[in-house]
Image (tube, rainbow, N blue to C red):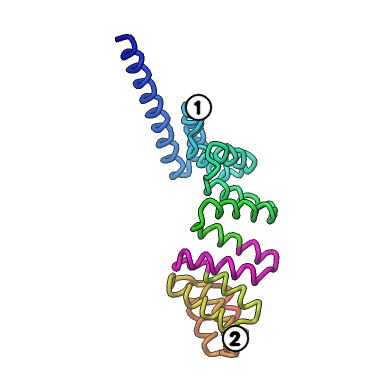
Amino acid sequence: MKILLILFIFFFSYTTYSQTAEEYYNSAYDKYQNKNYESAIADFTKAIKLNPNYVDAYNYRGVAKYNLEDYEGAINDYNKAIKVDPNFAGAYYNKGNIKILSKDYEGALADYNKAIKVDLNFAGAYYNKGNIKIQLKDYEGAIADYNKAIELDPNFADAYLLRGNAKNVLDDHEGSIDDYTKAIEINPDNALAYSLRGLAKHQFGALVGACTDWRIAVKMEDIISQTLIRTFCN
């Protein structure tokens, strides 16, 4: 009888403990969604106090700190999430995003590679690797990463857009036009894609098509295309 009583007390305490941590987490997440980051951090902290292994609470508390530009605090939370779960791909990815801000490109690439090692289908990590390689002027390497991101997510419009930029730098204007076109097919309201496709067409020698694209972009209030039309189309 005494053993049953002890087991009941343990089970009741554990259930209450878990539910309370979950309640704080849910409250914090709602506040986070409403961009009430300071209050969200306070509730995430309460959830973590009740459950020191609450990996999602560490991660989202880090994201909230990131939004408040507390980058050091955010990285500390991501590291705590990884300590609890070394296979938490999202925490590595989030760390990489912060390192990009300080132009620690090698550190960011290392974090994205860790995220990919854990999650081979992490299209966003490949995309951000491509963005870093653009900054490092490794355009062929960037294209390879964008290729992988697109393979994993065929509707990744931004990956098509930036792959088009990399191809354009390498003088593959026809390839870049194809990528801008695909980005437009996915998101017809992307003024930048029209503007860039117009530039690629101009470089390819198709001025009429370039002017058509720039006029569409101008209707979407793209200022750069207004200048391009005045320069090349009148």
Mark 2 element type: helix
Q: Residue 68 sits in which quadrant? A: top right
Q: Main secondary structure of the magenta part?
A: helix
The stretch drawn in magenta includes residue 144: yes
Does 62 appear above or below 161?
Answer: above
Q: Nearer the viewer, mark 1 or mark 2?
A: 1
- Residue 226, given in percent of the width and then of the height, sits at 56, 78
Q: Residue 29 sits in which quadrant? A: top left
Nearer to us in this view, 204 or 228 = 204
Local crowd at mark 1 within 10 Å, few (<14), some, or many (≥20)?
A: few
Mark 1 element type: helix
Task: Tell me the magenta residue range.
Answer: 130-159
- Residue 21, given in percent of the width and then of the height, sits at 42, 30
* Residue plotted at (55% across, 42% down): 86
Tally of marks: 2
Q: Which mark is residue 202?
A: 2
Quickly name the residue at label 1.
49
Nearer the N terminus, badge 1 or badge 2?
A: 1
* Residue plotted at (47% across, 32% down): 43
